[in-house]
């Protein structure tokens, strides 16, 4: 009987045992005008949020703002698209700087996000800085220049799928303009539990012993 290479077996075991639970993207729907704790502004069905910092928990993730952070609804932007306010028919988040963390402090990954710019900025950018659960950071800057440009349709957001943002303890968003965020696709990092790692190690040790006996 031919015994498969150890590397192939290890890869198969890791794939089977790794935690791969996903979650629906954070859409912010229902938050515009909602009665959240410690908000500074609330206008039913249109917008709500914090002016000068605040904390909001959405779908098991916390958003800690260093400055302004609003939840904007189509009831507001539908009336002011001529001012360059992005519109996509749903609620979204607007801000300049905030930090994202898992409410349970579990490591997480960023898989994708939709971004826009509030008003018509000729040069706007957003810097994402991830702090890894094991230490160290990684940054990436996304160009948001002239994204919505006073449009009157629902094409004011662009989807981004940056890499290298996995196994995060936190993710910082920082922009030189008021940026808008929707459909934030984050989820648990695929990391085997200690018991799973122990079982995988025992399995590999047994396979290695079998190979030695056969030789």
Image: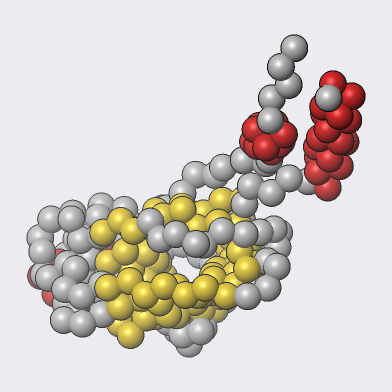
| Viewer-closest of 12 and 195 | 12
Vertically, is 195 above or below 93?
Answer: above
Residue ID at (11%, 70%): 150
Residue ID at (83%, 33%): 208
Quarter holding the C terminus is top right
| Viewer-closest of 35 and 138 | 138
In the image: residue 37, left or right of residue 73: right
Q: Tell me residue 85's x, y (percent).
A: 21, 70
Vertically, is 193 above or below 163?
Answer: above
The image quadrant of residue 6 is top right
Residue ID at (70%, 68%): 134
In the image: residue 188, left or right of residue 94: right
| Viewer-closest of 99 and 138 | 138
Q: Tell me residue 23's x, y (percent).
A: 54, 44
Quarter holding the N terminus is top right
Q: Tell me residue 188's x, y (percent).
A: 62, 51
Residue 125 visible in the current orientation: yes
């Amino acid at each position: 009987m031919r015994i498969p290479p150890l590397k192939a077996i290890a890869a198969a075991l890791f794939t089977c045992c790794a935690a791969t639970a996903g979650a629906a993207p954070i859409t912010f729907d229902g938050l515009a005008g909602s009665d959240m704790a410690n908000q500074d502004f609330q206008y039913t069905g249109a917008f709500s949020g914090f002016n000068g910092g605040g904390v909001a928990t959405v779908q098991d993730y916390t958003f800690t703002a260093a400055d302004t952070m609003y939840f904007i609804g189509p009831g507001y932007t539908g009336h002011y698209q001529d001012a360059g306010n992005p519109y996509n028919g749903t609620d979204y988040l607007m801000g300049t700087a905030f930090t994202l963390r898992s409410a349970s402090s579990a490591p997480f990954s960023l898989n994708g996000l939709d971004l826009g710019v509030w008003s018509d900025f000729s040069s706007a950018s957003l810097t994402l800085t991830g702090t890894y659960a094991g230490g160290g950071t990684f940054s990436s800057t996304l160009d948001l220049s002239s994204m919505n440009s006073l449009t009157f349709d629902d094409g004011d957001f662009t989807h981004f799928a940056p890499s290298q943002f996995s196994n995060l303890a936190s993710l910082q968003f920082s922009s030189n303009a008021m940026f808008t965020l929707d459909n934030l696709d984050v989820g648990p990092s695929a990391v085997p539990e200690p018991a799973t790692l122990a079982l995988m190690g025992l399995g590999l040790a047994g396979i290695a012993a079998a190979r030695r006996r056969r030789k």
